[in-house]
Amino acid sequence: MKIKLLLTAILLISFQNFFGQETKSAPVTDSLKTKTLDVEKENLENKLKAEKQALKEQQKAEDQIKQAEKDAKRAEKEQDKLEKEQKKFEKEQKKLANAEKDVEKSKSKIEKEKKNLEKMQAKFEKAKSKGKLTPVELEKGNVDLTKQQLRIKEAEEDLEKAEKKLKKLR
């Protein structure tokens, strides 16, 4: 019986320790303190999220600005390129117009020189038929006619050069 009593006493003490530790192990917390800590923690988390969001938006804005600057530079380069091409085209057109003008000028010069040759020949033949010319004047007239024919040949050469230049430009 002593053993039963001893075992019961030990058992009671064990239960008491077990349940006693359970109540002692749960810390006493202040609900107001935990609520304020939770609110502060929540506020800090919200603030952190807001800062991250603002940082992302700022980064997006900077990226858009950089992209807009790149686009502006690209457009400016394209505009410069178009202007250069336009100037080049205008220059070529001007050269072409000048070449055409030179061809027309050469043609009109040839016509003018041929008319002068015909007038000179007619005048020379008229004077020759009258028989008033001396042999020196005959030679001088022949030399003038030859010179006029040379001028016509030079004008024809100029015309050929102008036509070659015009073909080259076209």
Image (spheres, grey):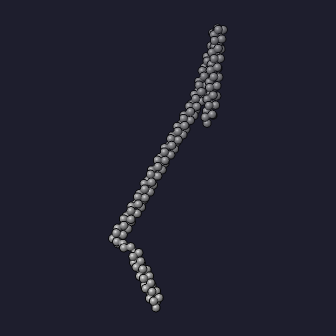
Q: Position of residue 43 (x, y in %)?
A: 37, 64
Q: Is residue 167 left or right of residue 26?
A: right
Counting from the top left corner in percent of width and height, residue 26 is at 40, 75
Residue with the most extreme front position:
2
38 sits left or right of 72 in the view: left
Q: Is residue 151 above or below residue 88?
A: above
Q: Nearer the viewer, residue 17 or 136?
A: 17
> Going by the picture, which residue comes out furthest to the left?
32
> Residue 64 location in percent, x, y?
46, 52
Q: Quadrant of residue 32?
A: bottom left
Residue 140 appears left or right of 6: right
The structure residue drawn at horizontal position 43% and vertical position 85%, both measured from the top left corner, is 9
Q: Which image quarter holds the C terminus? A: top right
State whether residue 149 is above or below residue 96. above
Q: How many marks?
A: 0
Report which quarter residue 156 is drawn in. Answer: top right
Residue at the image position 63 percent from the left and 22 percent from the top: 154
Q: Is residue 78 above or below residue 13?
A: above
On the question of residue 104 being in view, the answer is no
Q: Nearer the viewer, residue 140 or 29?
A: 29
Rendering coords of residue 110 (x, y %)? 61, 25
Pick whichever, 25 or 116, lies toward us. 25
Q: Residue at x 63, y 28 (%)?
A: 161
Residue 2 seen in render? yes
What residue is drawn where x is 64% and y is 31%?
Answer: 164
Q: Nearer the viewer, residue 81 or 148?
A: 81
